[in-house]
Image (cartoon, helix red, strand yellow):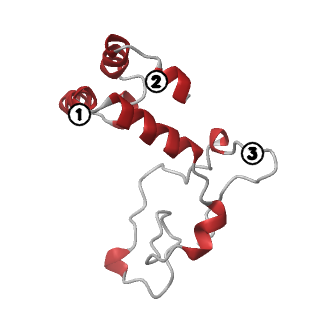
Amino acid sequence: MRQYMGAQTQDMYERYVKSGMATRMMVTKDSDFERIVAWGLASDRTAVTDAICELFAADLRDDLANIKSPRWSWAPGSAPASTPTARRPKPISGASTPSWPAWRSRSPTRAPLHNVG
């Protein structure tokens, strides 16, 4: 990945950013997509390459137990009884809790992550 991205010319990088191949599905409004494209075009290609490679290479599963964060549940109905009602997530009509994407489980020796809350 690093080799491919590092070999891109500035023109290739700009066409990729403008295509929205990696970002279009992240937004619903055209104005938000235009903002993301502007950010991408203003970003340093080397920094973007480094960030993407780190993102895809980092596997934090072994460190999860050491991460200290207040518990927050994204799944409707799974908030603990001690969570104030006002802070509990509201169910979305017709929505279901998505399963962990199979593409995130890159290692054949490791099971994919699941909600352990």
Residue pointed to by mark 1? 39
Q: Amino acid at mark 3?
A: Ser
Q: CA–CA distance between discs 1 and 2? A: 19 Å
Of mark 1 and mark 2, the one earlier in the sequence is 2
Q: Quadrant of residue 72?
A: bottom left
Precedes in sequence: disc 2 or disc 3: 2
Count neighbours of disc 2 (C-alpha within 10 A) and say few if under 14, some if 14 to 19, many if 20 or more.
Answer: some
Q: What residue is rendered at 38% in x and 18% in y? A: 16
Image spot of residue 116 (x, y percent): 63, 69
- How many marks the image carries: the answer is 3
Q: Amino acid at mark 2?
A: Gly
Mark 3 sits on what residue?
A: 107
Which residue is the site of mark 2?
6
Q: Amino acid at mark 1?
A: Trp
Disc with the residue nearer the chain's start (3 vs 1): 1
Q: Secondary structure at mark 3?
A: loop
